[in-house]
Image (cartoon, helix red, strand yellow):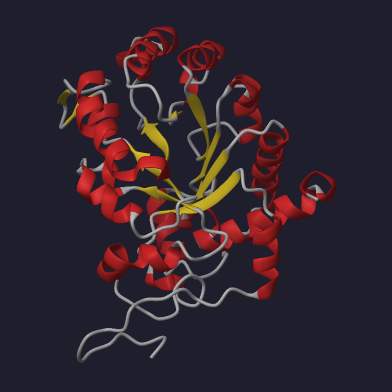
Amino acid sequence: MPGQLDLFGPAPAVGPAPVPSALAEVAARLPALVRLGTSSWSFPGWTGIVWDRLAKPARLARDGLRAYGRHPLLRAVGIDRTYYAPVDAATFAGWAAQVPRDFRFLVKAPAALTSLHAEGAPNPRFLDASWARDVVVGPAVEGLGERLGVILLQLPPQDARGLGGPAAFATRLHHFLTALPPGPVYAVELRNAELLTGGYGNMLADAGACHCYNVHPTMPDLRAQTRTVDPRRSRALVVRWMLARHLGYEAARARYQPFDRLADDDPTTRSAIAGLCLGAVARRQPALVIANNKAEGSAPLSVFRLAERIVESSPALLG
């Protein structure tokens, strides 16, 4: 029965939680260009929010995506697993088969591609376009097809001097991005504020790539990021709402588990992201926003409140 783990016999399939009529109305009014989702999906605390019954994380990781994809406001998801190790095309295809055609995946490139050092030594795969093409881009394109939304290059915090400084980093990143196969949307997420420069923004525009506007304590706020990198110059708007500014990762996880409520409501960030999305809609630019549990306490609830904010902010635009 819902709310209990099944101890004997086969467990019933995880299904979607009922969608309140008010959220269904918000989903009907949200522009099709705006896709919202969460960072991964295997959280038992989402029972009654996303899932119709309690299930263990391993089971949700394996089977929960089908139920997740049936929620009208969850039209995207971030794949975090690929940051730790690449996956093959068959794995991507298995995920794609569980969601509707208009669903989109944000796929994180492996840390092996974006970290200057690995286990204390120089990383030979750092920004290696050939390895990225064969191990990252190829399998994602083959397995996800039209459901591939963004390939995200999240660069962890690292010594910018080792990257040669902001200008040299931008040049190196440009060489890498322009060597990747054309077609997918590539987005870069920085965790070093000093690398966010006008030259970096110009480089992305020239390479046809996007900056991932991210909410994270190591980065300037969204307004500052948009002043440096103009979203009007990108082919898509990509936003990740990751971590409350007053908490570290472990502190946020401890405070927010089991991720079943908004513990730290952040209307300022919500309004800023809604404004970015409305700007993208006005430009006919696709927007993909991914929320993390550690932003406010529960990623799906953050998504629902964000959708409400987008819809209520501009009735004339959304009709």
Rendered residue at 50%/76% (across/down): 17
Q: In this orientation, does residue 222 appear?
A: yes
Q: Residue at x 16, y 20 (%)?
A: 124
Q: Residue furthest right?
A: 316
Give residue 64's quadrant in the image.
bottom left
Residue depicted at 29% across the width and 74% down the height:
56
- Classify 102 as above or below 305: above
Image side of residue 190 versus residue 311, left or right: left
| x, y percent for residue 316 | 85, 46
Q: Position of residue 60 (x, y in %)?
A: 32, 68
* Residue 260 higher or lower than 12, as above or below: above
Residue 139 placement, left or right of 235: left
Quarter that holds the N terminus: bottom left
In the image: residue 37, left or right of residue 27: left
Is residue 119 or residue 236 the one in the foreground? 236
Q: Camera-side residue: 135 or 127?
A: 135
Residue 81 at x, y percent in the picture: 28, 49
Quadrant of the rendered image containing residue 112: top left
**Percent x, y of residue 144:** 34, 44
Q: Which of 153 and 12 lies nearest the eye of the viewer?
A: 12
Q: At x 33% / y 77%, what residue is drawn?
A: 55
Q: Is residue 291 above or below residue 180?
A: below
Q: Is residue 190 above or below residue 202?
A: below
Count of marks overlaid on the render: 0
Q: Is residue 264 visible from the viewing direction of this image?
A: no
